[in-house]
Image (tube, rainbow, N blue to C red):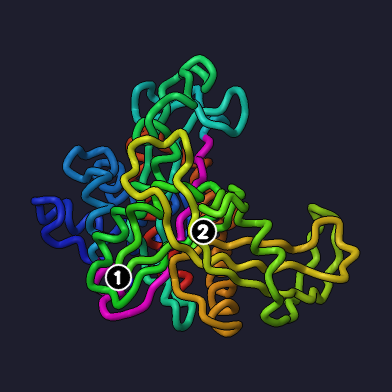
Amino acid sequence: MISVNYNGCFGDKRIDKRGSQLHLGLFQSSVHSIQSIAQNRTEQKGYYRFLHNDKTSEDILIKELVARCAKLSKGKIVLSIQDTSEVNLWSHSNRLKKNSGLGDIDDNRNGIGFKLHPSLVIDAENCIPLGFSDIRIWNRSIDAADKHEREYNKLPIEEKESYKWVESSSNSKKALNESKAVIIVQDREGDIFDQFAHIPDEKTFLLVRSQVNRRMPSKEKLWDVLSASNVLGYYELQVSADSRRKTISRTATIEVRCVVADIKCPGHDKKNRLKTVKIFAVEAREINSNAAEPIHWRLATTWRVNNLEDALCVIEWYTWRWQIEEVFRTLKKEGYDIESSELENGWAIRKLTVMMLDTIVKLMQM
């Protein structure tokens, strides 16, 4: 079903109906402008009121779409793919209301907007998107102190922005508790020992691109042991041309390795009760290539890898991260262009963003 029925969500039948109409309008028009979505002036005013109404909170919108995703995921093996982006509203910052859920961002020195960290759920059998198991949206304060001034490295992980990976994994684990299995997929920023120590259970698994050459109880390092292990097999991958990087298309030959390893808790982490965690480390390395940046992935997973077939499955799941990149591209560039929204209130733009993310998944399903 394409349209969303918000009946009972906001405690007011008129607001529920208006939200459902706005969601359908977003799907049918694929534009950011409320003026373009609305059929007339009355409808336009109704949509603005919906987005500015305290009853239509960001949290309620997220809770509703997560609940729908959980139903679709029941009994299935699913991937929950996390990544971070930011919405930069600097181009029309002169008309944005201050203290409305906006703050400094990374994009440039004068950037203003908010951060976005969704967990996109994909059917692990067929790569069909099912929805979101979590969406975190937050803003930094205006003129926030930099990491050095805040002594960022000395802060507990719960006070760092990087905690988003752990928190979203925990939220997804709860939301998808009726799934057959959940594999949480993250890029290198998610390589945090805290996750490996606390998130996995009998049906929740991590699949993270390794960023840290972690120590093992044998005093060896993970990457060294992995690269020195026997080759399990090979496969070929068609790599598309990239005009931005000025690279041509090529057929890459990839060799695959895998080891089972215990990784040690970092020495500075005094809180973790677990001092070692068992993982499966998979390496996919391009060979015999003249490319300036040949493919080289090291993946750490708690999903059992017994043979080449299992390793190839894990590698393929990791490559499905492109789906969340497509979501961001559609939200910000090709399609909705949320960064050009005519809305003046940051909270309203954030709510519209949640509704757009929901609609983008439906467009992808088609």
Q: Position of residue 45 (x, y in %)?
A: 29, 43
Q: Which residue is drawn at 60% across and 68% down?
A: 282
Foreground residue among 118 and 155:
155
Label of residue 33 in the image: none
Residue 191 relative to residue 121: left or right: right
Question: Looking at the image, is mark 2 or mark 1 nearer the viewer?
Answer: 1
Q: Position of residue 185 (x, y in %)?
A: 47, 62
Location of mark 1 (residue):
202
Residue 185 relative to residue 231: left or right: left
The quarter of the rendered structure image containing the N terminus is: bottom left
Tag count: 2
Image: 202 above or below 57: below
Q: Does residue 60 show up magenta in the picture? A: no
Q: Residue at x 39, y 48 (%)?
A: 275
Dot 2 or dot 1: first in sequence order is 1
Q: Where is residue 251 in the image (x, y as percent from the top left)?
A: 81, 76
Q: Dot 2 surroundings within 10 Å: few (below 14), some, or many (20 or more)?
A: many
Q: What SS does tag 2 mark?
A: strand
* Residue type (three-letter) at the residue carrying disc 1: Glu
Image: 349 above or below 312: above
Q: Residue at x 41, y 76 (%)?
A: 123
Task: Identify the magenta region.
Answer: 68-88
Q: Can residue 161 be seen in this view?
A: yes
Image: 216 above or below 311: above
Residue 355 falls in which quadrant of the image?
bottom left
Location of mark 2 (residue):
208
Q: Is residue 33 visible?
A: no
Residue 225 falls in which quadrant of the image?
bottom right
Q: Dot 1 surroundings within 10 Å: few (below 14), some, or many (20 or more)?
A: few
Q: Residue at x 90, y 64 (%)?
A: 290
Foreground residue among 30 and 271:
271
Extreme residue toward the front, this view = 218
